[in-house]
Image: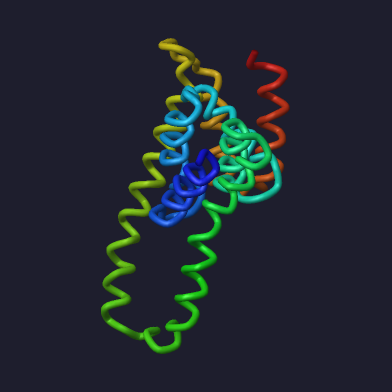
């Protein structure tokens, strides 16, 4: 029953989250909190770990939560659950894509989904910021400085995201404790 619950929870997250992995994070956190009692600080660490490991952040996060909840079978159930909706939807959409490519209804649906996706991404940013810059109830300014420096380098100088992540991780290990 535990594995089915995990599979269905992550299937629902995968099915109703538009906008990619970061848009899924608030829902994954809710599930992780419900299943394991995970705090926002613990989840922020999980997200950081998910970013530096190979693969999509949402799949890595789901796998980790599943592992925390039910070991390797739980990791498998959560991973399959979060991926399966995308696989099924891509298959179904590919069958009808040619037929509805220029459909006004399809364009209208996508124009409604885009703002919702931006909202979900912004909620993920707020959620991650809370876990990163607030330790307990104290404001930690060093992560804010890291954020601003990375934002400047990435935006203004088109910095390599992988290099920025590695450098920020090393700097964090040396400076933030």
Residue at horizontal 44%, vertical 47%?
23
In the depicted view, which residue is nearer to us: 12 or 24?
A: 12
Residue at horizontal 63%, vertical 36%?
67
In the depicted view, which residue is nearer to us: 65 or 142?
A: 65
Q: Position of residue 106 (x, y in %)?
A: 32, 76
Residue at horizontal 47%, vertical 40%?
28
Is residue 122 in view from this perspective? yes
Query: Is 23 positioned to the left or the right of 146 in the image?
Result: left
Is residue 156 in view from this perspective? no
Q: Position of residue 123 (x, y in %)?
A: 37, 39
Question: Image quarter for residue 18?
Answer: bottom left
Residue at horizontal 73%, vertical 27%?
170
Query: Is 76 positioned to the left or the right of 123 in the image?
Result: right
Query: Is 116 positioned to the left or the right of 18 in the image?
Result: left
In the depicted view, which residue is nearer to us: 2 or 121?
A: 2
Query: Residue reaching furthest bottom?
Result: 99
Q: Position of residue 13 (x, y in %)?
A: 43, 49
Q: Position of residue 34 (x, y in %)?
A: 42, 30
Q: Is residue 25 above or below residue 12?
A: above
> How many numbered discs?
0
Q: Is residue 171 above or below residue 139?
A: below
């Amino acid at each position: 029953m535990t594995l089915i619950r995990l599979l269905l929870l992550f299937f629902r997250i995968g099915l109703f989250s538009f906008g990619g992995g970061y848009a899924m994070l608030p829902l994954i956190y809710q599930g992780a909190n419900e299943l394991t009692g995970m705090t926002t600080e613990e989840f922020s660490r999980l997200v950081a770990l998910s970013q530096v490991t190979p693969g999509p952040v949402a799949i890595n996060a789901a796998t980790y939560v599943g592992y925390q909840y039910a070991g390797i079978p739980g990791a498998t159930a959560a991973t399959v659950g979060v991926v399966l909706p995308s696989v099924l939807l891509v298959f179904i959409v590919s069958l009808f894509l040619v037929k509805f490519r220029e459909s006004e209804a399809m364009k209208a649906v996508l124009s409604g989904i885009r703002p919702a996706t931006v909202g979900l991404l912004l909620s993920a940013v707020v959620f991650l910021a809370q876990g990163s810059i607030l330790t307990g109830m104290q404001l930690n300014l060093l992560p804010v400085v890291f954020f601003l420096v990375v934002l400047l380098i990435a935006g203004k100088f088109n910095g390599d995201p992988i290099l920025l992540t590695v450098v920020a991780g090393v700097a964090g290990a040396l400076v933030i404790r």
